[in-house]
Image (cartoon, rainbow, N blue to C red):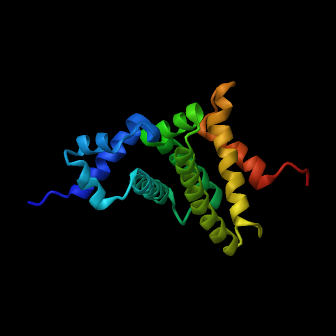
């Protein structure tokens, strides 16, 4: 049975980036973890940046699968959105690579780590944007700029679900859904 060296390299690189971050990962480490010669890596990837991009693309595909598993066409847009954002945030907080990159950005500001997290955020925004467009087309949402709206929705959810708890008691999933509905669905103006 032939060994899929490319797959071994990608798995080893994902492990190394998750353990050590982008900056501290070396091709020597990846080669050692994959149990291949360093030159073998270069037959598949021209440099560490290209290898990292491959890992980020895999992470983005995983997140989209997690989101798709939560989506139910029979649910309302906001019900789906709350469920999807909760699962994405939960996935992101438990996925070692995303956590390590967030720490690396916070502690060192590594440009490639920043780029990776930005790419991840753009993928999430793009996913939400597509769902917003579907909801607009179904007349479930008012016409709006789907990309800006997706950005606002993601940032609001992150603020309520993650950032709020840095200085306050964490909000329950149901409370976040209630606040999301108040701010985005109902609005704050009196009728």
Relative to 185, say whether 177 is above or below: above
Q: Identify the residue at the far front of this view.
A: 39
Q: Is residue 175 visible?
A: no
Q: Is residue 157 left or right of residue 85?
A: right
Residue 68 visible within the image: yes
Is 21 on the left-hand or right-hand side of 82? left
Q: Could you tell me which residue is drawn at 66 percent across and 34 percent down?
A: 163
| Observer-nearest of 125 and 144 | 125
x, y (%) of residue 114?
Answer: 57, 45
Indicate the position of residue 151 as horizontal and vertical percent values.
Answer: 68, 55
Residue shown at the point (67%, 38%) measured from the top left: 160
Direction left: furthest residue: 1
Q: How many marks?
A: 0
Specify the farthest residue to the right: 190
The structure residue drawn at horizontal position 55% and vertical position 65%, both measured from the top left corner, is 74
Q: In the image, 108: left or right of 184? A: left
Rendered location of residue 73, percent (x, y): 54, 66
Q: Position of residue 137 (x, y in %)?
A: 67, 75
Quadrant the N terminus occupies: bottom left
Q: Quadrant of residue 32?
A: top left
Give 105 or 58, whichever is nearer the viewer: 105
Q: Is residue 109 above or below residue 48?
A: above
- Compare residues 167 and 186 and report the one nearer the observer: 167
């Amino acid at each position: 049975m032939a060994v899929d060296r490319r797959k071994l390299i990608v798995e080893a690189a994902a492990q190394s980036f998750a353990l050590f971050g982008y900056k501290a990962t070396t091709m020597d480490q990846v080669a050692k973890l994959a149990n291949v010669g360093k030159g073998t890596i270069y037959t598949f990837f021209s440099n560490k940046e290209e290898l990292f991009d491959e890992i980020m693309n895999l992470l983005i595909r995983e997140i989209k699968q997690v989101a798709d598993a939560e989506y139910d066409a029979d649910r309302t847009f906001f019900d789906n959105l709350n469920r999807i954002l909760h699962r994405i945030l939960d996935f992101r907080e438990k996925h070692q690579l995303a956590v390590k990159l967030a720490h690396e950005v916070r502690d060192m500001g590594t440009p490639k780590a920043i780029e990776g997290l930005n790419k991840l955020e753009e993928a999430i925004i793009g996913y939400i944007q597509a769902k917003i467009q579907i909801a607009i087309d179904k007349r479930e949402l008012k016409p709006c700029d789907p990309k800006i709206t997706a950005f606002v929705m993601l940032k609001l959810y992150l603020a309520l679900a993650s950032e709020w708890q840095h200085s306050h008691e964490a909000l329950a999933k149901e409370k976040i859904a209630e606040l999301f509905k108040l701010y985005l669905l109902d609005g704050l103006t009196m009728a």
